[in-house]
Image (spheres, helix red, strand yellow):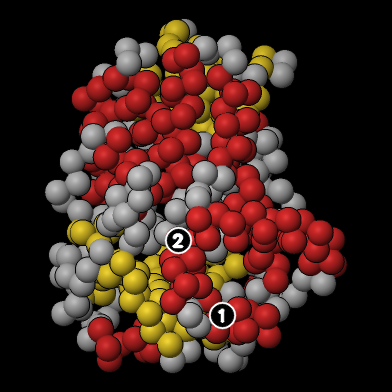
Amino acid sequence: MKNIDIAVIGAGPAGAATAIRAARSGANVVVFDKAPYGRDKVCGDGLTPRAVGALDELKIDMSDAHYIEGLRMIANKTVRELAWPATSRFPGHGAVWPRRRLDKALVDAADEAGAQIIWETEALPVLDGGRVTGVDAGGERWNAGMVVAATGAPGKVARMLGATRVEGEPYGLAIRSYVESPRHDSRHLEATLTMRDAKGNSVPGYGWLFPAGDGTVNIGVGALSTMKGFKGLNLNTLLDLYHSQVDESWGLGPYLEKPRAWRLPMSAVQRHGPGWVAIGDAAGLVNPMNGEGIDYGLESGMLAADLFLEDPASAPERYDVQVGELFDSFLRTGRRFSFLIGHPWILNAGLRLAVGTQAIANITLQVMGNLVDSKTPGAAGTVLKAADAVLAGLDPVLRRTRA
């Protein structure tokens, strides 16, 4: 039996951020991951300015990443190319950084900070009554002052802790591959907001091309569960349709690897309890409007570490309160909005509005860039508050009439 301060289950960006922050302050941290070192995590690879800001706060060297100036949004025949806004909170640029390299940079930083990383080892929470007291991993028991679930989409750990997806709430599915393109060094992400499946049905989601700057582009599509016929949606076919749609303008080659899909959780029944917290995707911290969650994972991981360092006993409860104050309103609004755009006629009208004027396109850009939360000033913050109030009243109707 071993005694440590923090046990982190999962060595992705969220778990690594927790380990970096806590270990640099002298905490005894052990990170467990079932995969081997250097594993590739299926992802879109795009980093918002919010994510770049979090990586800067963690002092991660990003010279290996591809610099991104803004977002090109396409809805029907309308194309708007917008620069990321520089704010007092976030830098005015994003990046594309394939997860194999991003995750390596983060776990290496955690290792350098003094955290112990144990690969190819499954760790499961130890429950004593209603409290989590540590983990069982590799045939050993590790007592921990706090266990951090950084396990991504809900699985065995989430079921043990009660951190599963809220039944009836929306979730997303996405698929991606890599292709060669002469535009691999473009300084803009591209998102096509008008997607149709093989039957011509409108799909609430988008297709993306994220240039990696290394000769390749990350190509993918994502869809929300609120659309009619979602269970019959073939992601491989949807990706092929998108590939053919953008092939000529990007000079795309064939897929360099078999397309891989993943689930995007957008809610959690619980994200804390005595002795534990869930962070990042494991806590349902994924933007329903774009499927992005790396930035939330980094921020929630750092917050969990900071609160534990201040007061281990109260950290889980304070973590839940502070995460809720920052993100719950925006994420709740996004989930409710996803019920609306599950209806094709609302989706198509909304897309025309989203890029119809420069002012509204700027708000759309902030939403797509995860730049909106409870602290956001200006038009975007005002729109968020108004939308939250209106959709709260409509929530019962939205659920009864979901597509």
Return the residue at label 2. 366
In this rendering, the answer to whether 153 lies above or below 379 is above
Return the residue at label 1. 353
Q: In the picture provided, is 306 more to the left or to the right than 332? A: left
Label 1 close to label 2 by CB (< 8 Å):
no
Q: Quadrant of residue 54?
A: top left
- Element class at badge 2: helix
In this rendering, the answer to whether 208 lies above or below 100 is below
Residue at image coords 22%, 86%: 251
Please say whether residue 246 is visible from this viewpoint.
yes
Q: Amino acid at mark 1?
A: Leu
Residue at image coords 53%, 60%: 379
Q: Residues within 10 Å of mark 2 (few under 14, many from 20)?
A: many
Residue at image coords 64%, 54%: 385
- Element class at badge 1: helix
Q: Residues within 10 Å of mark 1 (few under 14, many from 20)?
A: some
